[in-house]
Every structure is written in C-alpha cells, then in structure tokens.
C-alpha cells in the first residue's frame, strides 16, 4: 500500500478524569479512601487527517479527469454528458467533503478536551488544597463535552490562574480567618478592620463559588466567626455610618453562602435601627439611584418599617437640627409610597 493511500491508525486518548472517582489530577490527595499517585493526561496522538486529505485530493483529481473524458466522448458523438454520472459525481464529492469535515471536527474536539485537561492540571498545581473540590466541580457536577461549554470552562480556569486572582486567593487564605477571630475576641471592630473585612469576605465568597477555599472555614466557624462578626458591625453602627455602608456593600457581594445571603438584610436593618440619624445623613448625601438602593430594605408591613417610622417621627418632631427634620420627613414620604 502506498503512502498516499495509507489509512489512519487507531488513536488512544485519555481526555480527562471522568469516571476515576479516586483520582485527582497531579495531586496526592486522599479521595475515595485511597492514596493515589499523581495522574497525568495520557494521549497517543498522530496526524490522522494528512493521509485522508491526500487520498481525497487524488480521488477528486481522478474523478474530474474521468468526467472530462466521458464528456468529451459524448460530445464528440453529439450526445449530452451522462446525467447520472454527473449526479453521482456530485454525491461522491459531497460525501468526501463531509468526511473531511467530520475528521476536522473530531480533531478540534480532541484539541479542546486536551486544552481543558491541561488548564485543569495547572489549576490543581496552583491551588493544591482545593484539588478534591475542583475535581468534583469541573469533572462531576459541571462536566460537559459540548464545545461551547468547554470553552467557557477553559476561560473560567484561565481567569482563576491570573495573577490578580492568585493574589486575592493568597490574601483571603492568609488574613480572613485571623481577622474574624480578632474581631470576635475583642467584640469590636475599627474602621481599618472594617475596610479589610469588606474586601476579604467579598473575595472569599466569590472564590468559594468557583470551587476554591472550601476548607478555609468550617461550618461551626461560619456561625461563630462570620455571623458573629456581622452582628458586631450592626450592633456598633450607632458610632458611624460606615458600618451601615459596609453591611450594604457586603449584602451585594455575598452569593455563595446561600443561608447568609438570605438573612443578611437582618444585619442591615439592625444597623439602621441603631443609627437612624446616620441613615438620614446617608440618604441625603446620595443621588436618586443610591437612595433607591437604601429604600429597597423597606418592605411593606414589616416590623422593621414600623420601628423606623416611629424613630423618624420622633426625629421630625423633637430634633432641633433642621436637616434631620427634613430628611426624616422625606424618608417617611418614601415609605408611604411603598
């Protein structure tokens, strides 16, 4: 058999880790009760399309040459070219084109799968403490063979491997838990700690939603440190409007911790009740869009709204400072419009 007519040999390709529940890529992590040695992508690759393209090229060349000969013979006899031959030629050309397209798609799919495996392996090397969850995240819970979804996963992984996200990960891993512990131990928080907490916990929640930092805080620490810290911020809001603003900013950032996200408005409401004049200052110093954001915490017929109305009415009638009187009346009018 000539080189031009050789058939592609069988290709062996291990695309990833699907089905290997006790194996984590390039890590010696104990999963499924068994220590495993690092695993690497296994692939025997070859250019399968080169022989196919050469064969297609020669077949097409011979086909066209044969068709021209038949057309010439028929025309020399005063006859039309053989219609069936022309039709069959078209079908044959279509089949060859389709075969070429299918071969190209298979090659492209393999390249995409290998790129995803390579990106995943690099991520496991970068974040070894999270290798078990990352494996489940990308190869069990959200496993896909669709090209568009694989491209999206590759893009997400490459984003997590950026220097910016590596630095965010390092900062959260090193500083968040000690900061929470100090705040709870002292039962107090200063403005510098508050600024750091907003950044660190927002980054923590974001990275947690992407399969990272799952081992940083236990369930008990979530309640004893995280929830307690936010309650301290709300309790101490009477000294500064910064506490209210920080809680509102955190409320917009927290998404992964579903229980905390669903109950976070309680901390904001408590902070407002502890500092109604500070809330009036915040309202007056914001544009209409941000005022609407503040008013979103006022839901109809809730105990919080009733308590705020009592406080604002008292301020409107008993406070000597005109800005507080006018501000409280403006907020009361907005509440009545809800």
Image (spheres, helix red, strand yellow):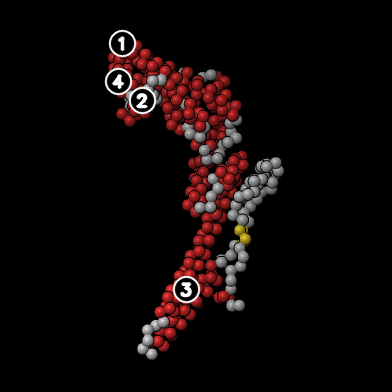
Question: In the image, residue 135 lies at what x, y percent?
Answer: 59, 44
* Disc on the earlier residue, 4 or 1: 1
Q: Which residue is mark 4?
A: 333
* Disc on the earlier residue, 4 or 3: 3
Q: Which residue is mark 3?
A: 92
Question: In the image, residue 246 lies at what x, y percent?
Answer: 44, 26
Question: In the image, residue 256 lies at what x, y percent?
Answer: 51, 34
Residue furthest to the top in view is: 318
Q: Nearer the viewer, mark 1 or mark 3?
A: 3
**Residue 318 makes an appearance in the image:** yes
Q: Looking at the image, which is closer to me, 214 or 22?
A: 22
Q: Which mark is residue 317?
A: 1
Q: Which residue is mark 2?
A: 295
Find residue 214 and report its image quarter: top right
Q: Nearer the viewer, mark 2 or mark 3?
A: 3
SS assignment at label 3: helix
**Point 56% across, 25% down: residue:** 223
Label 4 environment density (alpha carbons within 10 Å; few <14, some 14–19, many ≥20): few
């Amino acid at each position: 058999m000539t080189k031009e007519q050789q058939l592609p040999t069988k290709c062996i390709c291990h695309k990833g880790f699907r089905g290997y529940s006790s194996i984590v890529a390039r890590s010696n992590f104990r999963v499924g009760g068994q220590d495993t040695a690092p695993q690497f992508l296994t692939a025997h690759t070859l250019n399968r399309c080169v022989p196919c393209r050469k064969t297609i090229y020669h077949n097409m060349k011979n086909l066209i040459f044969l068709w021209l000969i038949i057309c010439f013979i028929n025309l020399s006899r005063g006859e039309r070219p053989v219609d069936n031959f022309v039709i069959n030629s078209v079908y044959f050309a279509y089949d060859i084109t389709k075969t070429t397209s299918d071969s190209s798609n298979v090659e492209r799919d393999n390249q995409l799968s290998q790129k995803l495996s390579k990106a995943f392996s690099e991520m496991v090397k970068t974040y070894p403490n999270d290798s078990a969850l990352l494996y489940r995240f990308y190869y069990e819970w959200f496993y896909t063979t669709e090209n568009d979804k694989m491209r999206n996963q590759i893009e997400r992984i490459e984003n997590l491997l950026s220097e910016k996200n590596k630095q965010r990960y390092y900062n959260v891993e090193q500083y968040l838990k000690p900061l929470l512990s100090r705040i709870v131990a002292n039962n107090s928080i200063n403005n510098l700690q508050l600024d750091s907490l907003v950044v660190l916990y927002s980054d923590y929640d974001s990275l947690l939603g992407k399969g990272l930092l799952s081992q940083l805080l236990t369930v008990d620490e979530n309640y004893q440190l995280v929830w307690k810290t936010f309650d301290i911020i709300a309790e101490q809001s009477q000294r500064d409007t910064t506490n209210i603003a920080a809680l509102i900013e955190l409320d917009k950032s927290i998404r992964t911790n579903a229980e905390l996200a669903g109950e976070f408005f309680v901390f904001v409401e408590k902070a407002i009740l502890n500092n109604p004049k500070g809330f009036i200052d915040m309202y007056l110093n914001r544009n209409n869009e941000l005022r609407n954001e503040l008013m979103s915490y006022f839901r109809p017929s809730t105990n919080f709204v009733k308590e705020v109305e009592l406080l604002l009415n008292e301020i409107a009638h008993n406070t000597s400072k005109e800005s507080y009187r006018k501000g409280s009346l403006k907020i009361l009018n907005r509440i009545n419009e809800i």
